[in-house]
Image (tube, coloured by chain):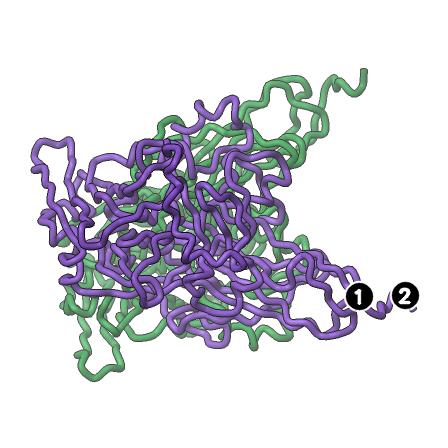
Chain colours: A green, B purple
Amino acid sequence: MASADAYADEPWGHRHLPNFIVRSKEPFNAEACPDRLVDSFITPTEQHFRRNHGPIPNIDAQAWSMSIEINAESSSVAKVKRTLRLDDLSKLPQFEVVAVLECAGNRRDGLKAIKPVNGVTWGAGTASNARWGGCRLRDVLAAAGVPAHLCDPFYANPRHVEFAAYGEVTDDEQYASSIPLEWAMNPLNMVLVATEMNGMPLLRDHGFPARIVAPGIIGARWVKWLKYIRVQDRESDGYYQQRDYKILPPIAGASNCEEFWPRFPALMEMNIQSAICRPTADECLQIGRPYRVRGYALTGGGRAVDRVEVSLDGGRTWNLADMYTMQTKADSRSGQRDWTAKHWAWVLWSFRIESVPPNCTIACRAWDSGGNTQPSAAVWNYRGVMNNSVFHVHPPTTGSAPSRL
Amino acid sequence: MASADAYADEPWGHRHLPNFIVRSKEPFNAEACPDRLVDSFITPTEQHFRRNHGPIPNIDAQAWSMSIEINAESSSVAKVKRTLRLDDLSKLPQFEVVAVLECAGNRRDGLKAIKPVNGVTWGAGTASNARWGGCRLRDVLAAAGVPAHLCDPFYANPRHVEFAAYGEVTDDEQYASSIPLEWAMNPLNMVLVATEMNGMPLLRDHGFPARIVAPGIIGARWVKWLKYIRVQDRESDGYYQQRDYKILPPIAGASNCEEFWPRFPALMEMNIQSAICRPTADECLQIGRPYRVRGYALTGGGRAVDRVEVSLDGGRTWNLADMYTMQTKADSRSGQRDWTAKHWAWVLWSFRIESVPPNCTIACRAWDSGGNTQPSAAVWNYRGVMNNSVFHVHPPTTGSAPSRL
């Protein structure tokens, strides 16, 4: 639990509040104003959402260190513990990856509208795209002396890598979470111990001095303010792995969730998602005039967004949107996709309405390379995670409506 | 095109017609009776659906050979061509994998009900689970002298591996299709040159003497009656890669599909899918009596099925089904999943109705480890592929209905 004055040292200096919809001040939870997100393929660092479970650690970069540990129950595996500092990381090969970071609670408001959920309210502003820089986790483990055979996916144990953060959190002794070791070691997956975001050192809010970047995986596993990295037999037993960030079935709620936590797996990959950023729900559209609808789409696990569609008639008919993304990704104009490359960045898309109709409900939906699309209606779950139902906006309209003639 | 008497030598001896719903005789296309599919976790070979684009080749095992080729445009890559026979394959390490094979057209009937589609009508009987045996594709390529560095996913070219089949087909000069080389070479993905199915040599209908098994990927890539395997720069340019087995947007139809084929990618992974096998649409249920609903669920790309739910009230409320699958897969009773293992088999599930209500519509839906679920309504596409909308059945009921009191 956070102590009374734990929030006395928050980094207000780099929180430009007009950029955000602030959902809670302590811990600081703020989403981007969604209409800003479509201005730039790389979200400016200052506009990137902030999602915290406690006060922000204030870490001296020179004094910082993290430990790399092996903690396997099988007796044949030697326990290893080594300490790394920023200087050690800077000597390893440096990589960059453009990847979208999405909170599993993105669009929780759509589930809260059905029934109360246990979690911070979020609109569609907890997804953003950044250029992350740092060392590959696989190189960090090797540099710390983790034996290579332990990282062979065919080796029986250990199978997980746990990350823990400095700082206090509201629900546990520390923030800890894990991902499968096989995923972490695959060089195609570009899991980083990141020290930079968009070419600059991480902000305190974003995990200074070092955080995990796990492209294609929900934000809860991108642990900030790294304290240790531990290769181990089991998943993290931390609260945020075992009792949060899971999709429970609709029959599970506050009174009976204890029964369901151990029966459902921890979330990893993002699902197929899209949102309309413009118009916002209170942007007034001129009837009969053209308007360009804009939004983002993303998916997880390295899959590609193959298609985004927009409906102006409540989902009866759908039109293809124009997609913009990186060259390594799906190109809606050319046939062959680079299937070898995995897809980590988001897609920005737009669709031009030639003549805005009165009282139009605009909807968007996306499809990914796994053949999945978004469900038309949201399915409630207790923690309000992974809501990817078809996105609707019903902006006010003004001007001469054909229906008024 | 198949010649006039091309179908004179079909293997009718191993086609027990009562096992099937025959959709076309030439080519022979027959789906399993769905109610049989839930009798056995491993589908008996004789009940496994048959999906063909032409007559069945009649291959002499002793005379059969396939060639292994490299055909890369980059001049630094030496062209390789070597011939392998069954005897060569038998000397390589043998592997087995239990994997579900699903036709991308499974449940096409649900799309045909919306608007005509171009393709054989299928219900939910073109998915089946089998134990496949043979050599790993990576070992076959190595045995044929394909240089190891060509199979490094970071090597620029080639990036695809094409499979072609012996025999004539209706739409092209041969049946050819490809998958990404990176996928094929990853030992976790268990791509096989299979010679056995459920412990026996392949039947002619299933690809004798050798076929591709590509777990997690749609059946169209599991090429039968192998003629060649070719490592190359590009995707297969065959009809079944470039002009079929793609999800076109709803605005694409017979008159304008030429414009859309090159703009959309070839399908690879299956999407999250589930179907009710019992009751069938014409099975009469006794009102007020218990009944156990049964079905299957599956997904692609190595993801796990995390949850199956059943609704008795048209999707208003949902109940958890009991799932059965292999030990390496999601266990609905225990917490931690083996995340390292990929998930290739299907899930059989059941749900006990304590007292059958009159006029009930039973629905099922599944969720996978990518956080995806099935859309509530089917979205039409021209080829009628990848329909994974929520499955409904409305069986007749009989007996004393509470509503009649």
> What amino acid is found at the position of numbered circle 2 in the picture?
Arg
Query: What residue did someone put label 2 on?
Result: B404
Say which residue appears at 22% left-offset and 59% top-offset. B135
- Residue A185's spot in the image, x, y percent? 24, 59
Discs 1, 2 touching: Cβ within 8 Å: no
The answer to whether residue A175 is visible is yes
A338 is higher (above) or lower (below) than A158: above
* In the image, farthest residue toward the bottom: A75
SS label for mark 2: helix
Left or right, A179 with reference to A124 = left
Dot 1 crowding, Cα within 10 Å, few <14, some 14–19, many 20+: some
N-terminal of the two: label 1 or label 2?
Answer: 1
Residue A379: give its label.
none
Left or right, A211 with reference to A272 = left
Say which residue appears at 41% left-offset and 73% top-offset. B336
- Residue B149's spot in the image, x, y percent? 11, 47
The Cα atoms of the two marked residues, 1 and 2, are separated by 11 Å
- Residue A137's spot in the image, x, y percent? 24, 58
Left or right, A262 with reference to A228 = right
B12 is higher (above) or lower (below) than A355: below
